[in-house]
Image: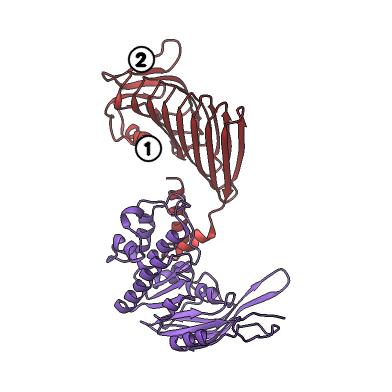
């Protein structure tokens, strides 16, 4: 059964108020606590390591899979390896959040590998939300690795969101796009206090006419630190565009390392990166509508990270 | 009513102090529409920003409805009912037009967002869900900026060159909108403008030049001055040349 705390964490990471509809697998403190499969989506526990295989049959359309992970105790390190097979011509939503409630002083850590095979002509939206909370000063650490292979004509849309409470994170995302495959990643990141976040996104455009777009927006407050490594690797007649925008405040540090690598003369690759404070004109505008300075700042950041 | 008493404003550069406005004394009455005009660099925008509290005067007093507001910040002045439409409005990533207008209209229950956009010549259906970011053209952004001022229940509305960047067709609509607000509400309206169509709306015209209000006059006088005068307004070390093709020579 799910406790009130479990439900609160589920709401934060998966927008769920209770057990979800469709296929799901809820993992709490290293153990599966609830699972549902459907006629088209099967979930099987891996035999050789900790994790699950999620198999979406070809032509499955309009279904969703929720696989939230909850950590509600201190001194716990959870490692998981999940594999997803998205069948040809499917159209599915996958929601995979991790919520840590660390009640005491020990470290709570979740390291997960998510490997996706998006088959020919399939479409997948993948949402990953990270959230941390807890009364103690125990560290909350999340290190997700995401590997995605998109076959011919496949489309993937990724939303990677970490807005609050995670002390340290290293997010590593690798994508391989074959012929006519398309990808859009939107990343939203907020750090405060002395949090540290690192995001590596490496996209390989292998097939002809493949396209990739990465839109990263982040806010670094207090003495937090953020590091971004984004690489677009063009190996064909392809198009790739990275927009990396960061708002820096207080004593924070943001490092953005752009890299575009072309191995084909018809590869069109663009990287845009900007780091700066909130524009004073934006603040003045909202204050001139009657908002206090702090309210104006919050409204600007909220919109920016939406 | 807003009064400025002996208001001066200057900016310190590396080595010197540049006086932008000098000893401004002016009263702006309720329900009146003032057009502020004059050459570039004369101090018009600074005057507007002093009213909103974006700039603080180096000396002098600003009094609004009998209360001194010289020391009040932007938010406090906004809450008293003062509004300012930017000449170059900022863009906001992730903020939708309807969200910005709703923030603006939060003190005004009678506001209808669709009507607001109509008043500035935009079709609500096409704009309410757009982001106020670089996807909007300069003219579109400017019209939305004006709509944020119209959305508020203001005692004093200041518009800094509302016509800049707006096409002629939309401008006609905008001039009508200013006329309607002026007829319907008691708001004191101050418009910085060089456009004849806007000057025609004025109850009074303030001619600002060289950091001072040179004249508080009528639109008729200003319009006749402009049409009848082929002198250029040269600064002192330039020689005036009067003729059909007016030009300035040293």
Task: Locate residue B145: give its quadrant.
Answer: bottom left
Query: Which chain does the purple colour mark?
Result: B
The chain that hosts pointer 1 is A
| Quadrant location, the N terminus of chain A | top left
Q: Are the two marked residues, 2 and 1, in contact with CB atoms closer than 8 angstroms?
A: no
The colour one sees for chain A in the rendered image is red
What residue is shown at x 29% (from left), y 63% (from top)? B115
**Picture coordinates of residue A61 (x, y %)?**
30, 26
Residue identifier under label 2: A44
* Label 1 neighbour load within 10 Å: few <14, some 14-19, many 20+: some
Q: Same subunit under labels 2 and 1? A: yes
Residue displayed at 49% across by 59% down? B90
Q: Is residue A299 left or right of residue A269?
A: left
The residues bearing labels 2 and 1 have C-alpha atoms spaced at a distance of 26 Å
Q: What sort of colour scheme is used for the picture?
A: by chain
| Location of mark 1 (residue) | A12
In the image, residue A37 above or below residue B128 = above
Q: Indicate the quadrant containing the C terminus of chain A: top left, top right, bottom left or bottom right.
A: top left
Say which mark, if any, is on residue B74.
none
Question: As displayed, is residue B164 above or below residue A88?
Answer: below
Chain of the residue displaying label 2: A
Q: Quadrant of residue B146?
A: bottom left
Front residue of B4/A27: it is: B4
């Amino acid at each position: 059964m799910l406790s009130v705390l479990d439900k609160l964490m589920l709401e934060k990471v998966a927008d769920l108020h209770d057990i979800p509809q469709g296929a799901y697998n809820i993992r709490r403190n290293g153990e599966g606590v609830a699972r549902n499969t459907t006629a088209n989506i099967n979930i099987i526990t891996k035999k050789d390591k900790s994790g699950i295989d999620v198999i979406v049959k070809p032509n499955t359309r309009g279904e969703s899979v929720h696989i939230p992970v909850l950590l509600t105790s201190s001194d716990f390190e959870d490692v998981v390896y999940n594999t997803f097979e998205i069948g040809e011509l499917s159209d599915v939503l996958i929601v995979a959040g991790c919520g840590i409630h660390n009640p005491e002083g020990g470290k709570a850590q979740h390291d997960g590998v998510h490997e996706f095979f998006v088959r020919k002509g399939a479409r997948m939206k993948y949402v990953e939300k990270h959230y941390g909370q807890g009364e103690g000063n125990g560290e909350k650490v999340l290190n997700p690795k995401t590997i995605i292979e998109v076959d011919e004509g496949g489309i993937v849309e990724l939303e990677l969101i970490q807005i609050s409470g995670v002390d340290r994170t290293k997010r590593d995302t690798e994508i391989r796009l074959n012929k006519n495959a398309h990808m859009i990643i939107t990343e939203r990141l907020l750090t405060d206090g002395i949090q540290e976040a690192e995001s590596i996104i490496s996209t390989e455009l292998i097939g002809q006419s493949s396209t990739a777009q990465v839109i990263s927006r982040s806010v670094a407050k207090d003495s937090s630190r953020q590091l971004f490594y984004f690489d677009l690797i063009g190996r064909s007649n392809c198009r790739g565009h990275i927009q990396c925008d960061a708002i820096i405040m207080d004593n924070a540090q943001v490092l953005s390392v752009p890299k575009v690598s072309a191995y084909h003369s018809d590869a069109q690759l663009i990287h845009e990166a900007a780091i700066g404070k909130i524009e004073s004109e934006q603040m003045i505008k909202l204050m001139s509508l009657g908002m206090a300075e702090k309210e104006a700042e919050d409204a600007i950041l909220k919109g920016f990270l939406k | 009513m807003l009064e400025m008493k002996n208001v001066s404003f200057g900016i310190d550069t590396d080595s010197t102090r540049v006086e932008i406005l000098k000893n401004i004394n002016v009263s702006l009455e309720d329900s009146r529409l003032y057009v502020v005009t004059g050459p570039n660099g004369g101090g018009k925008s600074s005057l507007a920003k002093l009213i909103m509290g974006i700039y603080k005067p180096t000396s002098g007093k600003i009094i609004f409805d009998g209360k001194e507001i010289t020391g009040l910040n932007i938010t406090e002045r906004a809450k008293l009912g003062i509004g300012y439409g930017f000449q170059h409005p900022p863009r906001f990533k992730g903020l939708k037009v309807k969200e910005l207008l709703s923030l603006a209209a939060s003190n005004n229950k009678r506001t209808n967002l669709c009507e607001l956009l109509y008043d500035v010549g935009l079709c609500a259906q096409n704009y309410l869900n757009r982001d106020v970011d670089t996807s909007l053209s300069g003219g579109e952004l400017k019209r939305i900026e004006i709509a944020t001022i119209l959305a508020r229940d203001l005692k004093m509305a200041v518009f800094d060159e509302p016509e800049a960047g707006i096409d002629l067709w939309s401008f006609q609509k905008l001039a009508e909108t200013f006329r309607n607000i002026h007829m319907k509400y008691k708001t004191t309206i101050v418009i910085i403008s060089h456009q004849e169509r806007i000057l025609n709306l004025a109850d009074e015209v303030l001619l600002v030049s060289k950091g001072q209000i040179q004249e508080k006059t009528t639109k008729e006088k200003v319009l006749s001055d402009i049409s009848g005068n082929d002198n250029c307004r040269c600064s002192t070390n330039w020689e005036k040349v009067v003729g059909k093709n007016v030009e300035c020579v040293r």
